[in-house]
């Protein structure tokens, strides 16, 4: 399954390049923060911020998920029915198409990071081996969690035609609370304390700070990820069972 | 001209009545844009929290730029995005042929065919922020009026860029990604251009003219902008508009040869 979807993805190389470029939001903010930190009024140095946002960019590249758009179309157009007849749960098709896309995306993402390291050569860094392993694990978990969350929202398509609106709202929270706009250490303390209870910082901030060797509370971070994943998994299966009944109820 | 006006009214009234079927959506749209706004303000606040300032831009002045950005975002959600999606499907399904046969400019048809009220909350919130920041800065009516021409010029530039991207669908057919790239880059317009490092400033002024979309209107409103910027803004809008029309004609040549 993986190799089939990989071949699929490589066919659309030009498109992939655009997808990579569309994730430039962290790079824009990197410029802003690097400039702001030069004033010395923040706790972090410009190079640290450059490193952080490059890590954010990478993590984000590996955790992009779009399952809801495809799933919603399948439900609305009734295309889901033939897939239900197959002996594999339809979710795996989506899952593997996402995973294989990661590999096809890899070269472009690294190219862009290389380009920015040329722009800020003093920011070049190497994660320690242990941290690199942990960061990889955290990124994979983050991808799974994000996929689970979006797939859970996608299941709402059984009841409403515009499940994607839910995801858009969720995505806003994700944008502002995940550490994409600024490292959490620059948030006001009260806000940060609240945000750490939500799943968002573990999607971006946690893996990214592992990658630049500045993570704190590593065990707690992983525990929070597993916990949130479990929660969404239960909700997901419950919705799936009830949703299918609803779906066949529509006579499709 | 008269005919175009009539067609426009017809297009928009049908589009509006179709969209108003989904009134619950309006609540979601309003909620989404409200939280988007809160998030943006929070993002800006993170910079100003410790007493740092974007070079020469106070908190209220930076809010003004954010207001302009929100306004333009609403504009693109209302007019640009729905029409662009239409162009893509029309090219895919070949129904573009019917449009080309109509006795009015095809560019006019394609860029005004529908309108979506879901961008309205953004427009309203944008105006509210601008009014609030303007009030805090003690700006008079004249300042608000001064901001209108550069804002319209910015909107024209934005529209031309979008339309040119839409025209590339003749070759690429699937262009959602391209528009995503543009949208991602436009995000840079949330902040005054001087907040960026020099390399970024050059990029956002000369390559992707984000500076002209939000910073120049805000500057004009504050009475800081020199005549030169306004002139450049007008020039840019004019050039881009003509370019978009030329590019469309050019793209169409490939369409006819590809379809038959």
Image (spheres, coloured by chain):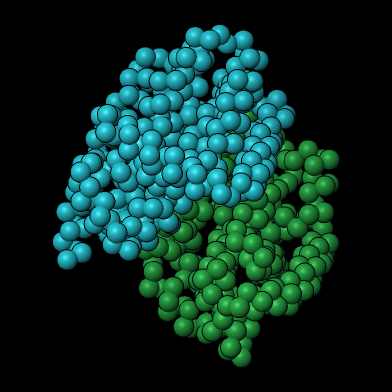
Chain colours: A green, B cyan
The image quadrant of residue A149 is bottom right
Viewer-side residue, A171 vs B53:
A171
Q: Does the rendering let one see residue A136?
A: no
The image quadrant of residue A158 is bottom right
The image quadrant of residue B64 is top right
Q: Does the rendering let one see residue B147?
A: yes
Residue under the image location 56 percent in, 49 percent down: B21
Q: Quadrant of the C terminus of chain A?
A: bottom right
Q: Is residue B103 placed above or below A65 in the rendered structure?
A: above
Report the label total: 0
Q: Where does residue A109 sit, x and y in percent of width and height? A: 49, 61
Residue under the image location 66 percent in, 34 percent down: B41
Q: Where does residue B65 sit, x and y in percent of width and height? A: 54, 27
Q: Is residue B143 placed above or below A240 in the rendered structure?
A: above
Viewer-side residue, A115 vs B30:
B30
Viewer-side residue, A162 vs B233:
A162
Residue under the image location 42 percent in, 40 percent down: B12
Viewer-side residue, A24 vs B145:
B145
Q: Where does residue A62 sit, x and y in percent of width and height? A: 57, 64
In the image as oriented, which residue stretches furthest toward the bottom?
Answer: A87
On screen, residue B156 versus residue B20, left or right, reads left
Q: Where does residue B163 sit, x and y in percent of width and height? A: 33, 44
Q: Is residue B74 placed above or below B67 in the rendered structure?
A: below
Residue under the image location 44 percent in, 48 percent down: B82
């Amino acid at each position: 399954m993986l190799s089939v979807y990989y071949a699929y993805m490589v066919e659309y190389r030009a498109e992939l390049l655009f997808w990579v470029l569309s994730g430039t939001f962290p790079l824009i903010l990197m410029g802003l923060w690097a400039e702001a930190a030069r004033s010395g009024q923040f706790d972090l140095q410009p190079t640290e911020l450059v490193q952080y946002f490059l890590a954010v960019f990478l993590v984000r590249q590996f955790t992009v998920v779009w399952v809801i758009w495809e799933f919603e179309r399948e439900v609305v157009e009734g295309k889901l029915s033939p897939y239900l007849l197959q002996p594999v749960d339809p979710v795996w098709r989506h899952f593997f198409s996402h995973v294989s896309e990661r590999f096809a995306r890899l070269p472009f993402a690294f190219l862009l990071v290389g380009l920015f390291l040329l722009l800020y050569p003093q920011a070049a860094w190497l994660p320690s081996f242990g941290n690199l392993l942990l960061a990889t694990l955290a990124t994979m978990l983050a991808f799974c969690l994000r996929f689970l969350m979006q797939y859970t929202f996608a299941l709402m398509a059984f009841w409403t035609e515009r499940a994607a609106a839910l995801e858009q709202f969720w995505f806003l929270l994700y944008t502002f609370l995940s550490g994409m706009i600024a490292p959490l250490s620059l948030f006001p303390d009260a806000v940060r304390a609240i945000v750490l209870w939500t799943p968002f910082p573990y999607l971006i901030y946690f893996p990214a700070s592992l990658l630049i060797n500045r993570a704190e509370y590593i065990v707690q971070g992983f525990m929070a990820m597993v916990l949130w994943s479990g929660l969404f998994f239960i909700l997901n299966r419950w919705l799936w069972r009830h949703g299918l009944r609803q779906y066949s109820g529509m006579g499709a | 001209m008269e005919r175009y006006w009539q067609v426009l009214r017809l297009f928009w009234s049908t589009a509006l009545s179709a969209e108003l079927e989904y009134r619950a959506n309006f609540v979601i749209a309003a909620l989404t844009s409200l939280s988007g706004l809160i998030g943006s303000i929070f993002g800006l606040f993170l910079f100003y929290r410790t007493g740092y300032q974007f070079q020469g831009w106070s908190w209220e002045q930076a809010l003004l730029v954010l207001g302009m950005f929100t306004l333009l975002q609403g504009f693109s959600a209302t007019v640009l995005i729905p029409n662009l999606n239409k162009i893509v499907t029309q090219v895919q399904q070949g129904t573009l042929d019917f449009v080309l046969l109509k006795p009015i400019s095809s560019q006019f048809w394609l860029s005004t065919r529908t309108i979506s009220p879901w961008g309205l909350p953004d427009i309203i919130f944008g105006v509210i922020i601008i009014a609030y920041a303007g009030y805090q800065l003690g700006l008079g009516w004249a300042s608000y009026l001064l901001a209108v021409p550069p804002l319209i010029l910015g909107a024209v530039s934005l529209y031309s860029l979008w339309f040119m991207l839409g025209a590339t669908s003749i070759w690429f057919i699937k262009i959602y990604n391209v528009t995503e790239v543009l949208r991602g880059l436009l995000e840079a317009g949330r902040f005054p251009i001087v907040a960026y490092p020099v390399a970024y400033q050059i990029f956002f002024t000369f390559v992707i003219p984000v500076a002209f979309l939000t910073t120049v209107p805000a500057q004009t409103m504050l009475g800081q902008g020199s005549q030169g910027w306004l002139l450049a803004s007008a020039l840019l809008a004019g050039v881009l508009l003509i370019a978009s029309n030329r590019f469309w004609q050019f793209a169409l040549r490939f369409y006819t040869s590809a379809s038959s």
